[in-house]
Image (spheres, rainbow, N blue to C red):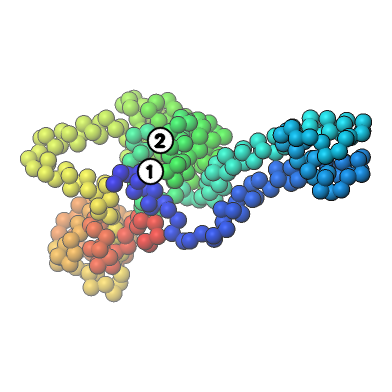
Amino acid sequence: MTRLAWLRGRLRPRRPRHPLGVERLVLSLVRPSLLLAALVIAGGAAGYMLLEDWTLREALYMTVITLSTVGFGEVRPLSEGGKLFTVALIVGGVATLSFALVGIGERLRDAPRRRLERRIRRMKDHIIVCGFGRIAETLVPGLIRHGYHVTVIEEDGDIAEAAIRDGIPVLRGDATSEEILERAGVRRASVVAALLPNDGDNLSIAMTATGLHPEIRVVARSEEERSVANLQRAGAQPQDVVSPHRTAGEVLLWMLSHEGAARIAPRIQDVARGHFETGALTIARDSPLAGKTLADAVIGGRANVLVMAVTADSGDVTVAPRGARRLGAGDRLTLVGRTGDLRRLGARVDGPAPGNA
C-alpha cells in the first residue's frame, strides 16, 4: 500500500453522513443561480401573457423555446410589441441564463476550496508546513497519523491540487507572504515548519511567523551551514534547524563505520515509519515503580519497550538513563515500543492514529 493510499484510508470519514448531505450542499451552492433562472422564465411568461393575452401554458412554452434558442415556430403570430419583447428576452434572458449557469459551475468548482478554508479557520494549535516537497511528503502523512492538525502551504498549483485530492489541507500561495501565513492561521498555530529548498525563503518565513506569533515554534530546513545562525536569530532553536544532507551523511557514516549498524538501521526506520510508537508513563505516588531503580523495575521485562529518557518532576531530562537511575513520584518516562506493549504498561501512547485515542 502506498503512503498516499494509506492516507486516503485514514482520512475517510468514520461517521456516516446524512444521506441528503451532498444534495443539500449542491442546492445551497446553486440556489442563487436557480432563482435567477426562475425569475427570467417567470418574467418572460408574464410578458407574453400581458402583451399577447396568451394562456400561462402558451406563455411558458414560448419563453422556454425562446431562451433555449431551439428555433421552433411561434405559438401565435406576434404583435409588434411582442416581437420587441421577444428580442429583449433573447438578448437579456439568454445572457442572464448563461451568467447563471457559469455561476453554478464556479460555485461547484470552488466548493472544495471553501470547505478547506473553513476547516483551516477552525484549526488551533496546529502545525503549518511550508512547502510540500519530498520531506513534507513523508512528514505530513506521519503527523496526520499521529493525530496532529496540519496545514500545508504550497505555491505549485499541480502539487497543491494533488495533495488536496488526497485529503491534505493545502493553501496555494507563497509561504513567505504574511497574508498567506495569516490565512493558514499562524497566530493560532503551535509550530511552523519552513521546508522550502531556499534558505533565504525559510529565513523569511521564520521572521514573519515569529513577528506575527512570538511564541510559535519554528522548525526550519537549512541547506547551507552559514544559514543556521540566521535561522536561530529568527527564532528557531538549535535543535530545530535541520540540514537534510548533513543528517543523511551522518546516518551513512554511522552505518558504514559501526559493525552491525546495517542490521539495526532498518529497525530504527520502523520507528520513523510508524511501526512503533512513542509513549509516556508518569510514575504516580502509589505506583509500585516509585522508589525503584530502572534495573529493579525491569520495565523491559514487563513489556517489549525501551526507556529512551526520564524527565524528573523538576524538569531535568536524562537521556538513555542507566539502570541505577531511581524513579520518583512525578517522573515521566519516554518509551518506545508497539502500541499494545505501551498500553500493557499503562503508558499514554503519544500520537495515536485518529479515532483510536
Q: For the point 39% across and 48% down, which residue is it?
A: 8
Query: What is the CA distance from the residue labelled 1 to the residue labelled 2?
Result: 9 Å
Q: Which mark is residue 140?
A: 1
Q: Which residue is mark 2?
A: 132
Percent from the top left, x then y, of residue 326? Answer: 20, 63
* Secondary structure found at label 1: helix
**Crowd class of label 2 (few under 14; some 14 to 19; many from 20; radius 10 Å):** many
**Farthest residue toward the left?**
259
Q: Quadrant of residue 222?
A: top left
**If the image is split into quadrants, where does the C terminus sit?**
bottom left
Q: Quadrant of residue 344?
A: bottom left
Taking the image as shown, residue 277 lies to the left or right of residue 31, namely: left
Q: For the point 16% across and 43% down, which residue is it?
A: 265
User: Amino acid under label 1?
Assistant: Val
Taking the image as shown, residue 120 lies to the left or right of residue 258, namely: right
- Name the residue nearer the viewer: 320 or 342: 342
Residue 222 visible here: yes
User: Amino acid under label 2?
Assistant: Phe
* Secondary structure found at label 2: loop
**Farthest residue toward the bottom?**
286
Q: For the point 91% across and 40% down, which residue is it?
A: 52
**Crowd class of label 1 (few under 14; some 14 to 19; many from 20; radius 10 Å):** many
Residue 211 visible here: no
Count how many numbered circles sit on residues in the image: 2
Percent from the top left, x then y, of residue 34? Answer: 70, 45
Percent from the top left, x then y, of residue 212? Answer: 54, 39
Taking the image as shown, residue 155 lies to the left or right of residue 106, namely: left
Q: Are marks 1 and 2 in contact (CB under 8 Å)?
A: yes
Percent from the top left, x then y, of residue 39? Answer: 79, 44
Image: 260 above or below 329: above
Q: For the point 57% across and 34% down, which residue is it?
A: 179
Q: Earlier in the sequence, mark 1 or mark 2?
A: 2
